[in-house]
Amino acid sequence: MKNKISIAVLFFLCNLQLLSASNVINAMTHERKFYPVRERLSTISLNGTWKIQIFKGLEIPIHLQMWKESNYNDVSWNEIKVPGNWETQGLKVPEYGVEIAEYTGLYRKSFNYQPSWKGKNVILRFDGVHFGYEVFVNGKKAGQWGSAYNLCQFDITRYLYNDKKNTLCVKVTSRSMGWKFDTNDCWGLIGITRDVELFTVNNTYLEDVTFVSDVTTDLNATVRLQVDINTFNESEYHQQQLNIALADLQNNHILEFSQPLSKEIHNYNFEGIIKQPALWTAETPNLYRLEVRISDKKGNTVQQINEFVGIRSISVEGFDLKVNHQPILLRGVCLNEIDPKSGRALSFEERRSQLLKMKEANINYIRTAHYPFAPDFLKLCDELGFYVCCEVPFGARGAENLNKSQFMPELQARAEATIRRDKNHPSVIIWSLGNENPYTSIVSEVIKYVKEKDPTRPRGLPQKAGEFMRFIETPDKNVDIIMGHYLSDARIDKAVAKSKKPILHTEYAHAQGNAFSDLESKYARILKEEKVIGGSIWCWSDQAVLTDGSFNTDYEIENANKKRDAQRKLPKEYQGIKIDSNHFMDTFGERGADGIVYADGYPKENFYQVRKLYSPIIVSPVTFIGELNTENIFKIELENRFDFKSLHGYQMKWKIRNLQAILQTGNVWLDIPARKKKKIDLKVQLPLQIPFNDIMLCLEFIDPYGKRIHERNFPISIKGYPKEYASWNEEVKSRLRNKISKQIVSSDNGNYSYSISKEGLFTISNGKEKMLETPLLLRVGREETLILKTQLSRLGSTFNWNPYMLEPIIEKFEAYKKDNGVQITLSCRWHGKNAHSDQYVSGEVNIYFSPNGKAIFDYELRPSTNATGNFLECGLTLDAGDSYKQFNWLGEGPYSATPGKSAYNERDIWCLHRDDIRFNGNRKNVDIGILTNGKSGIVFLSGNGNIGIENKHGKIYISQNTIVSGYGNKFSKPNALVSMKDLIIKGSLTLFMEDLNSSSSLSYQVFKSFPTVVPEKPYMKTYGW
């Protein structure tokens, strides 16, 4: 039904503030402006196969001087797919950052003249070309442009043949006036990277269309439109009409405007009021269809555009960023427009898949780092619901030019092109200007220029920490949001105290490798600080190009003669991801390995951490205590972190579980208003007895479409009854055959034999074969993976011990019988880099072979007084060999757990194959773990709940970690480091063998079965953490 409302149609002869079409500053061309025609039936695509000739240098060789002529023979030239990059199609070796050599690529493409073009003007559009380019049609120059990420359109009518094929030639170079602004800390890929299309316009045409909506506090809306009309020849101007309609998705016309055109008027302004429209937000991405049509006196269409717009308002009030008068929190990521195979020429399907994956991670905001993306991206953000901080492209590698007045027109042209194209997208709520540049008078003028072009959106200047701290004292008056990168807690404290404007962390929680230890604490600060409106994690995906891994780029480490963007600082095995023997995702080492997903979109552990923390539904921390054989009431407090949506239609499914047995289930339909909390009481009847006194409350939150968006598992302590895993089988006493000698001590319970030699070699056998044979290793660190290598190269090697698995020197070996078992004491010393080093750890390891078939290890160790550095992880470690394939455990999982990186885990029963990409790392709060080989298993009980597992060259190493540090980040050492001063390393580990098929075994009681799991192994080899 049409929702006809009172409409005030106001026709103004004055310009709107937003994007006046006159006097546009353009550094590259003074050609006419055309509103981009993108309707599929109204455009002709020139995408596809082109001819290309690439050569080093900027001067065209003599033998190619005639390259742009129509009759030039290009049969011997290479072919290239457009859009696409030279490097991803094997035509050039990829180079990084600003250190790209001078190259030229000559493109040729033929196309036919269309009969429908007669009497019209033909417009050629390039949506993006890296870096600078000149356009020739049939040998005549049609124009040039030099901003890689901005579109440019050329009127090529006068150069066309109407009776034979036309030849389009494009000279693309790696240089333009502002080319450095288009290089960033990423691959410097060259080519025609976005769509190339032709469309036509008549003598009278749409020059620009601007749609603005203002939402009132009672959620009505005023819609303002400015339509700029131009003509090629005013003498041929005929009576025409401008018709505008705004329709909902059911095609009900909500607003209609109509105005006769006059050749004396170029700017037409309209205004209308809509009662209670369906407002656009990232949570409710409601869209309307805007139709703008010029028709002649007979009603025939002269030109028409259709696009989707959203009704919403953006404002900064105090320290709040508001959408439709409601404060919002930006839970975001930075995104780089790159794919290993497609380069910068991502397809619509690739973009959509990427954005849907972001939805899974509960991301609501994207910063386009560091440039405006291809048009499809914003259309998808409008449709799917994302807030976008759209960045005017001038990156810091061009910062040297920001004090040069001759670059002012260049920067204003980039700003104008960005705003002109993207201003009608509701998803764009912030303009950010450049990346990590110094604040200069020229930058100030560009900010002012952006405000003049679009005063409806707030503006910000993304800055490094130092520049940010200076800027916050006296920010530019035209900046509405203060934007900082990687702020320490101390700097956040100062910024919050001093800032008179809202703060946005445009980059935070750098995800280099798989470290990411900052997110939990930094996001907690974002939630805490009233002046902080959110943040964008750096970044969504690794930045990589697909190669064969041959490194045919004169690979050298730390070549002092090369500048930073040309240096590969890490060894080859850390330069990217080996998919298979022929495919390698090259991240340029640590430089591009900075995403929460891998370059091909495969999620890292980091992805799941973001998903958990950014969840719109949060369960407040709580400790549950239950009583057996009675009804218990468990109180749960839920928080709805949506800014607009209630949880109506969402449900909480709950289970009471004892290990794998479900004792009780329920379902609660939720209806919590946005930004509110609510307490829910669950009535639970607990039975008289529960095996092992182990019980959990498991919660799952399901959205209205049936998709799980959040989950939490809470252990329930049973009043008066502790868990019984450690005391399992204590009362069982086996008849042991104990042997004590000066060389070896053994204890045989009839099924398995445990022994320890004076050299510290611990063995378990079943009489037929050895089930385990290992020295008493000491873990004192971690494998030097990408993040650790990077930290060591930046910060020095003093904090890490390598080798990190140390073999013992046994200095004393004693044994005696105790309580029907055998007690062994070993005085051990584990040396660092060499056996004569004064860097060592020493102390006693006590082993008790108990009468119930367990080997119990207790140890107390100290580093030497001269020991330096830190133990990133430390604890007694056993080499389980290569016969054990998987690890099952009851505890937190499935991911590693370290300080600053554990929120994504939940307590449950988990299992991983040793070849799984997520196998290595510490597991926390483990009640019981078991290594299995299909027949038998080694059960582990850790005294403090930490068990570290690592697959090293096909062998599993298992550690009882008494020290676990975090992974840190790109800018700092690992976090939560433990000082060597007065350090005591004290731990305990119990282990014993069990038959997996025995129903009376502890492992069977807990795990029930041990099916073989298939490892999650998307790659042959990764760069590690």
Image (tube, grey):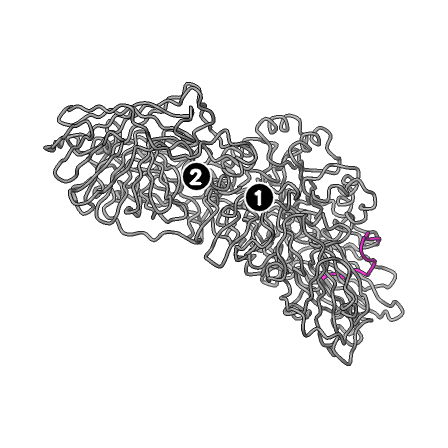
| Quadrant assignment for the N terminus | bottom right
Q: Which residues are magenta?
A: 23-36
Q: Residue furthest left?
A: 735
Q: Position of residue 195 (x, y in %)?
A: 66, 63
Q: Residue furthest right?
A: 235
Labelled pair 2, 1 in contact (Cβ < 8 Å):
no
Q: Is residue 316 left or right of residue 891?
A: right
- 795 vs 1025, nearest the viewer: 795
**Label 2 neighbour load within 10 Å: few <14, some 14-19, many 20+:** some
- Mark 1 secondary-structure assignment: loop
Relative to residue 993, is residue 858 depicted above or below? above
Image point 38% across, 37% down: which residue?
922
- 77 vs 597, nearest the viewer: 77
Q: Of discs 2 and 1, which sits in the foreground?
A: 1
- Mark 2 secondary-structure assignment: loop
Q: Position of residue 364 (x, y in %)?
A: 55, 46
Residue 208 located within the stretch drawn in magenta: no
Q: Is residue 903 left or right of residue 24?
A: left
Q: What amino acid is labelled 1 in the image?
A: Ile
- 974 vs 743, nearest the viewer: 743
Q: Which mark is residue 557?
A: 1
Relative to residue 1006, is residue 86 depicted above or below? below
Q: Position of residue 265 (x, y in %)?
A: 85, 59
Image point 72% across, 65% down: which residue?
106
Which of pointers 2 and 1 lies earlier in the amino acid sequence? Answer: 1
Q: Residue furthest front?
A: 836
Q: Position of residue 352 (x, y in %)?
A: 55, 57
Q: What amino acid is labelled 2 in the image?
A: Glu
The residue to which callout 2 is attached is 783
- Magenta portion: prevailing SS class: loop
Quadrant for residue 104, please give it: bottom right
